[in-house]
Amino acid sequence: MALSIARRTKATLHLSMVHKPLEATYAEIQLFDDTLDRQILAQEEAYLKNISKRLLDVADVPIQLHHQNATCRASCTRRQWPPRPVWSS
């Protein structure tokens, strides 16, 4: 649907993915595997580029990719009203 709208209006199609850093908590010790996290990040970027290529194969629309990191502060685990954004572009 977004591709159809972008094509008809000659708008840029924005593809976005939010990467959540790989974290595991065990016995109150936070473990972080940087190598695995980088591999996951690379796979996500490859996925976005593949989707972009597939869309460009069927439609001539400008596509902009967005790949952001998300971090969840302790405050985002509590229920809040109104909800606040956890990440920003």
Image: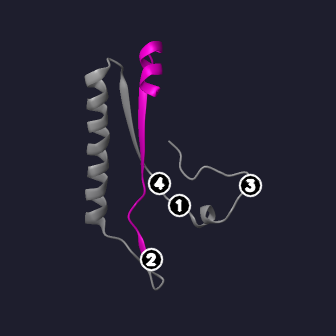
Q: Position of residue 9 (x, y in %)?
A: 48, 14
Residue that lies at the very extreme toward the front in this rendered image: 1
**Element under label 2?**
strand
Q: Which circle's residue, 2 or 4, is located before the other in the chain? A: 2
How far is mark 4 from mark 3, CA to CA? 20 Å
- Residue depicted at 63% across the width and 64% down the height: 75
Highlighted magenta segment, given as a residue range: 1-24
Q: Examine the rendered structure and indicate whether residue 45 appears above or below residue 21.
A: above
Residue that lies at the very extreme toward the bottom in this rendered image: 27
Answer with the quarter of the image where residue 32 lies: bottom left
- Residue depicted at 41% across the width and 17% down the height: 7
Residue at image mark 4: 70
Q: Examine the rendered structure and indicate whether residue 59 appears above or below residue 40.
A: above
Give the residue type at disc 4.
Ala
The answer to which of 49 and 72 lies nearer the viewer is: 49
Q: Position of residue 53 (x, y in %)?
A: 26, 30
Residue at image mark 3: 81
Q: Examine the rendered structure and indicate whether residue 39 appears above or below residue 49.
A: below
Give the residue type at disc 2.
Thr
Q: Position of residue 62 (x, y in %)?
A: 36, 21
How far is mark 1 from mark 3, CA to CA? 17 Å
How far is mark 1 from mark 2, CA to CA? 14 Å
Numbered label attached to residue 72: 1
